[in-house]
């Protein structure tokens, strides 16, 4: 099936737009050095570019008072809290605090005032307080950047819409270890779970929004 035929097949069935809401959060998903360090098993070169693209989005979010939340993945030294995911994907066992590569990428590292949510599974929502935090803040739009597109970004987008939030993924600001799953998952997110948008759209949205505290 060609790409055009694929789009025709989905036309009128999937792909409705949810758009931006009134109060967003910028959610940075797992921008850890494990994904940007060539010697690490999770290394995904395209994440390096996603980090670069995210810097000006993060800058304007902070300037405009948009809530910024970061996630990371960290396990106990024996990975008992990784459950079946670590059994399925043993590469995740490297995500322990004693591994220097689990530090945040310095270009987009959290400020002391910004919430960091540590998760054990793919979704930023599963087993965490994220949904409650967003609801308490009156947030209706989750703008997502990070890695990987086919893993934690997709899982978080699915859970965002299932928790009643508008799921927005910035195309230039997410990355994966291979273009094929990256593009396939962006297509699915955009078709079924949220909107995949260009960075300029979010920059304009943040620039114009009047954030209510």
Image (tube, rainbow, N blue to C red):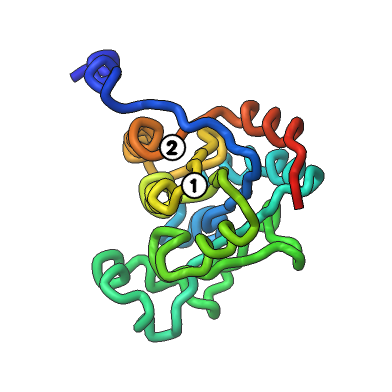
Q: Kindly check if marks 1 and 2 are in contact, taking CB atoms under 8 A apart as contact.
A: no
Q: Where is residue 175 shown, x and y percent of the image?
A: 48, 43
Q: What residue is at 54 percent from the left and 78 percent from the top? A: 97
Comparing 207 with 183, the one in front is: 207
Q: Where is residue 129 shown, x and y percent of the image?
A: 52, 68
Specify the quadrant of the image occupied by residue 186.
top left
Whether residue 37 is visible here, answered yes or no, is: no
Residue of label 2: 194
Judged from the image, the secondary structure of the residue bearing numbered disc 1 is loop
Residue 66 appears left or right of 140: right
Q: What residue is at 68 percent from the left and 31 percent from the top? A: 205
From the viewer's perspective, is residue 90 above or below residue 174?
below
Which of label 1 and label 2 is nearer to you?
1
Residue 4 appears left or right of 39: left
Q: Earlier in the sequence, mark 1 or mark 2?
A: 1
Q: What residue is at 64 percent from the left and 27 percent from the top? A: 200
Residue 165 circle label:
1
Specify the quadrant of the image occupied by residue 60.
top right
Residue 27 appears left or right of 127: right
Q: Where is residue 164 shown, x and y percent of the image?
A: 45, 49
Comparing 107 with 43, the one in front is: 107
Residue 164 appears left or right of 60: left
From the viewer's perspective, is residue 1 above or below residue 120?
above
From the viewer's perspective, is residue 157 above or below residue 117?
above
* Residue at the extreme left of the image, as rendered: 1
Q: What residue is at 51 percent from the left and 34 percent from the top? A: 171
């Amino acid at each position: 099936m060609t790409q055009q035929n694929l789009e025709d097949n989905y036309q009128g069935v999937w792909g409705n737009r949810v758009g931006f809401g009134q109060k967003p959060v910028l959610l940075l998903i797992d921008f850890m050095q494990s994904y940007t360090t060539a010697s690490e098993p999770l290394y995904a070169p395209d994440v390096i570019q996603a980090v670069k693209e995210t810097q000006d989005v993060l800058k304007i979010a902070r300037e405009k008072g948009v809530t910024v939340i970061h996630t990371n993945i960290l396990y106990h030294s024996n990975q008992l809290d990784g459950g079946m995911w670590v059994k399925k994907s043993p590469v995740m066992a490297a995500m322990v605090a004693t591994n220097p590569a689990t530090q945040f990428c310095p270009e987009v590292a959290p400020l002391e005032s910004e919430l960091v949510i540590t998760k054990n599974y793919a979704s930023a929502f599963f087993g965490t307080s994220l949904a409650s935090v967003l609801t308490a803040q009156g947030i209706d739009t989750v703008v997502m950047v990070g890695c990987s597109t086919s893993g934690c970004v997709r899982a978080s987008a699915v859970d965002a819409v299932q928790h009643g939030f508008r799921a927005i993924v910035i195309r230039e600001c997410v990355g994966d270890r291979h273009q094929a799953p990256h593009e396939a998952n962006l297509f699915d997110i955009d078709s079924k779970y949220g909107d995949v948008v260009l960075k300029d759209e979010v920059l304009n949205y943040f620039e114009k929004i009047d954030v209510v505290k």
